[in-house]
């Protein structure tokens, strides 16, 4: 299963008939392809992501246990666990790793420079040193980005436009949503925007779902 073919899987952009795809060889060596999935949260949280992922696999003619093996590893919202989980997937000799966030992609890249990594919902892959550039990624990482950090300051501006005279704002912050460098830039950008708008800003961290209720109480 080639790297470009799997990217087509992720985007559900394949044009082959399902029956024809199912008859494709399962690997250059005849062995069943093995895909590693590295998720930042617990299995229960990841279930919503797994469903469309497996649907896309099925549409491409891949069925887990028949012509594909999927190794899943969940980080339980504990970033320090991700490097070991990524190394475990590499040790299983997976053919590629699907990483569902910037931190999981970073952990996967640290674990291997040869296994293809398909990273979804990255924030700033260039700033986080996952790829050389968006046009020419290079290396073994590819995927999708929503360039979220570039919109942080704009969201504060929009809030000010909606609420004229806005003086104080509390912002919910996931400290490990992106890479360390990108997170530092996100905080700097929103703090700079708040100063420019003359708004008092309070950043309230929440690392996972269990922290959200307390964060809102703090706000």
Image: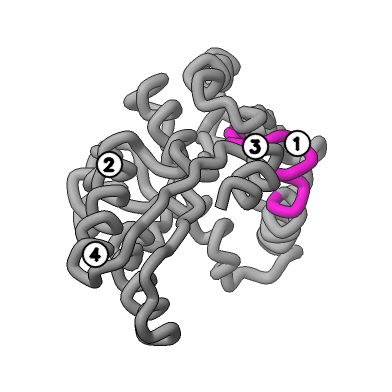
Instruction: Tell which of 166 and 102 is nearer to you.
Output: 166
Helix, strand or loop at disc 4?
helix
Mark 4 is surrounded, within 10 Å at the Cα level, by few (under 14), some (14 to 19) or many (20 or more) other residues, namely some
Name the mark nearer the viewer: 1 or 2: 2
Helix, strand or loop at disc 1?
helix
Mark 4 and mark 2 residues within 8 Å of each other at the beta carbon: no
Instruction: Tell which of 208 and 161 is nearer to you.
Output: 161
The residue indicated by pointer 3 is 41
Q: Quadrant of residue 169?
A: bottom left
The residue indicated by pointer 1 is 43
The residue indicated by pointer 4 is 193
In the rendered image, the vertical position of residue 148 relative to residue 32, given as above or below? below
Mark 3 and mark 1 residues within 8 Å of each other at the beta carbon: no
In the rendered image, the vertical position of residue 183 relative to residue 73, given as above or below? below
Name the mark nearer the viewer: 3 or 2: 2
Helix, strand or loop at disc 3?
loop
The residue indicated by pointer 2 is 184
Measured as percent of width and height from the top left, residue 39 is found at 60, 37
Range covered by the magenta-colored residues: 36-49
**Lower sequence index among marks 4 and 2:** 2
Q: Is residue 12 left or right of residue 132?
A: right
């Amino acid at each position: 299963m080639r790297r470009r073919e799997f990217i087509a899987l992720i985007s559900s952009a394949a044009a082959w008939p399902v029956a024809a795809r199912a008859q494709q060889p399962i690997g250059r060596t005849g062995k069943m392809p093995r895909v590693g999935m590295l998720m930042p949260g617990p299995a229960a949280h990841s279930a919503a992501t797994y469903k469309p992922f497996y649907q896309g696999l099925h549409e491409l003619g891949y069925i887990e246990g028949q012509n594909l093996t999927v190794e899943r590893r969940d980080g339980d919202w504990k970033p320090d666990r991700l490097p070991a989980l990524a190394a475990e997937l590499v040790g299983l000799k997976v053919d590629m790793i699907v990483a569902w966030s910037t931190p999981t992609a970073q952990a996967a890249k640290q674990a291997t420079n040869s296994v293809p990594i398909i990273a979804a919902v990255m924030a700033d892959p260039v700033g986080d040193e996952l790829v050389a550039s968006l046009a020419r990624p290079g290396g073994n990482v590819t995927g999708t980005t929503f360039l979220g950090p570039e919109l942080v300051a704009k969201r504060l501006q929009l809030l000010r436009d909606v609420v004229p005279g806005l003086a104080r704002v509390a912002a919910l912050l996931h400290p490990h949503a992106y890479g360390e460098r990108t997170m530092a830039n996100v905080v700097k950008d929103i703090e700079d925007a708040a100063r420019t708008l003359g708004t008092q800003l309070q950043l309230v961290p929440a690392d996972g779902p269990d922290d959200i209720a307390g964060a809102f109480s703090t706000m």
